[in-house]
Image (spheres, rainbow, N blue to C red):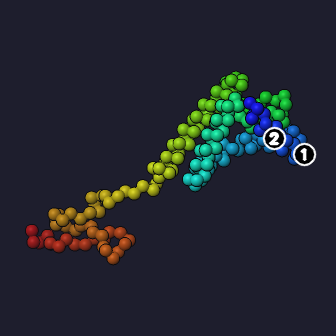
């Protein structure tokens, strides 16, 4: 835990150099803490593959730090600037689902939500970059109404014109119906 304490002390020292009040720093940290998941979701949904890879690596690092330190490092930093207030970013969610706001519940629900969000991240990654939703090629198969059958000569058929790229055109069958 020496590493954790060193990180927290260094971050606290940097933030105190801003000469902002503890209350203001705490509010800024909570706003950042709130917008991190929104930013991550936006990058996953709309960002490039490189950015999504970066998010995956950062998520894994954050989760390892959470497990190692026993709590979110950002929450611990918030508590240093808001002494006496034990509210976390997860508390409104816990209150909404009628769960007591204890540190054990906070930790358990954070792990549950992280696991769920990471699973969703993997599904979105698969859809966007492996399955490539909306960008699949249908291959050379087309519907039977757009193909001409060489054995069927009893009426007009649809054939693609080699010079007309705008779509299929109607042409008469080589044999007329009067010959049958």
Q: Is mark 1 on a helix, strand or loop?
A: loop
Name the N-terminal-most of marks 2 and 1: 2
103 and 159: which is toward the camera: 103
Q: Image quadrant for the C terminus?
A: bottom left
Q: Image quadrant for the N terminus?
A: top right
Quadrant of the image occupied by residue 60:
top right
Residue under the point 38% across and 71% down? 166
Is the residue marked by circle 2 packed among few (<14), some (14-19), or many (20+) residues within 10 Å?
A: few
Outermost residue toward the front in this view: 2
Q: Is mark 2 on a helix, strand or loop?
A: helix
Residue 171 lies left or right of residue 134; in this view the side is left
Residue 41 visible here: no
Q: Where is residue 135 in the image (x, y as percent from the top left)?
A: 45, 56
Outermost residue toward the left in this view: 180
Q: Residue 19 carries which label?
A: 1
Where 71 falls versus 152 (above or below)?
Answer: above
Distance of mark 2 from mark 1, alpha carbons?
15 Å
Q: Where is residue 109 in the image (x, y as percent from the top left)?
A: 64, 29
Residue under the point 52% across and 47% down? 125
Q: Where is residue 58 in the image (x, y as percent from the top left)?
A: 64, 44
Q: Where is residue 114 in the image (x, y as percent from the top left)?
A: 61, 35
Where 138 falls versus 55 (above or below)?
Answer: below
The total of numbered circles placed on residues is 2
Q: Residue 48 carries which label?
A: none
95 and 37: which is toward the camera: 37
Where 74 falls versus 108 (above or below)?
Answer: below
Residue under the point 58% across and 34% down? 115
63 and 141: which is toward the camera: 63
Residue 51 visible here: yes
- Return the residue at label 2: 10
């Amino acid at each position: 835990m020496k590493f954790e304490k060193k990180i927290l002390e260094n971050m606290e020292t940097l933030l105190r150099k801003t000469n902002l009040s503890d209350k203001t720093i705490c509010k800024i940290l909570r706003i950042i803490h709130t917008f991190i998941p929104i930013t991550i979701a936006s990058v996953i949904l709309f960002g490039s593959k490189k950015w999504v890879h970066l998010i995956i690596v950062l998520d894994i690092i954050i989760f390892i730090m959470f497990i190692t330190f026993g709590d979110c490092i950002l929450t611990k930093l918030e508590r240093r600037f808001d002494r006496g207030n034990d509210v976390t970013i997860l508390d409104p969610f816990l209150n909404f689902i009628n769960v007591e706001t204890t540190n054990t519940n906070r930790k358990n629900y954070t792990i549950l939500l992280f696991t769920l969000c990471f699973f969703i991240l993997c599904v979105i990654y698969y859809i966007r970059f492996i399955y490539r939703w909306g960008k699949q090629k249908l291959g050379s198969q087309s519907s039977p109404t757009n193909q001409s059958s060489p054995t069927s000569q009893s009426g007009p058929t649809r054939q693609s014109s080699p010079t007309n790229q705008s779509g299929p055109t109607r042409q008469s069958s080589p044999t007329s119906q009067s010959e049958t």
